[in-house]
């Protein structure tokens, strides 16, 4: 299960993820990010509530970030739990996902 909360300011938005990002939830995440990026040029993904991510979730995250950045948008990642960061690190994504709150 994945809960997504959005906090939108005038110039920047925050998407806070709570739960699990995987095969059954990645499409919801992608749609939520796309909706926020339609209205904002800068989004922070707050992952402190993300307890689990699998390869589908990582793939969806990377695709969404790539698409956003290709469109001239800024997406950064913050508040990553050590166990989730370890997955990013093992997959060699820690450099790609670098943002506020990452090691």
Image (cartoon, rainbow, N blue to C red):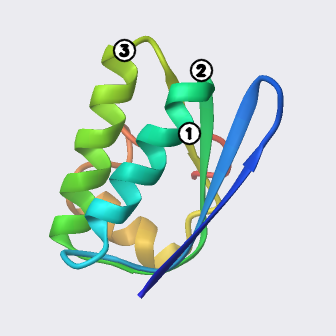
Q: Position of residue 66 (x, y in %)?
A: 28, 30
Indicate the secondary structure of the residue bearing disc 3.
loop
Question: Residue at position x 46%, y 52% from top?
Answer: 32
Q: Quadrant of the N terminus?
A: bottom left
Q: Position of residue 87 (x, y in %)?
A: 31, 69
* Left or right, 54 with reference to 65: left
Q: Position of residue 2 (x, y in %)?
A: 46, 79
> Mark 1, residues whose alpha carbon is within 10 Å: few (<14), some, or many (≥20)?
some
Q: CA distance from mark 2 to mark 1?
A: 9 Å
Camera-side residue: 49 or 31?
Answer: 31
Camera-side residue: 91 or 23?
Answer: 23
Question: Residue at position x 38%, y 21% from top?
Answer: 69
Residue at label 2? 41
Q: CA distance from mark 3 to mark 2?
A: 9 Å
Quadrant in the rendering for residue 79: bottom right
Circle 3/circle 2 CB separation < 8 Å? no
Indicate the secondary structure of the residue bearing disc 2.
loop
> Mark 2, residues whose alpha carbon is within 10 Å: few (<14), some, or many (≥20)?
some
76 relative to 31, above or below: above
Q: Earlier in the sequence, mark 3 or mark 2?
A: 2
User: Residue 71, which numbered label?
Assistant: 3
């Amino acid at each position: 299960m994945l809960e997504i909360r959005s906090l939108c300011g005038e110039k920047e938005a925050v998407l806070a993820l709570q739960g699990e990002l995987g095969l059954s939830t990645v499409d919801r995440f992608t749609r939520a990010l796309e909706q926020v990026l339609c209205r904002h040029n800068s989004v922070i993904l707050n992952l402190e509530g993300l307890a689990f991510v699998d390869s589908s979730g990582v793939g969806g995250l990377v695709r969404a970030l790539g698409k956003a950045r290709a469109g001239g948008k800024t997406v950064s990642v913050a508040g990553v739990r050590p166990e989730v960061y370890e997955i990013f690190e093992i997959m060699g994504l820690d450099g790609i996902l670098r943002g506020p709150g990452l090691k």
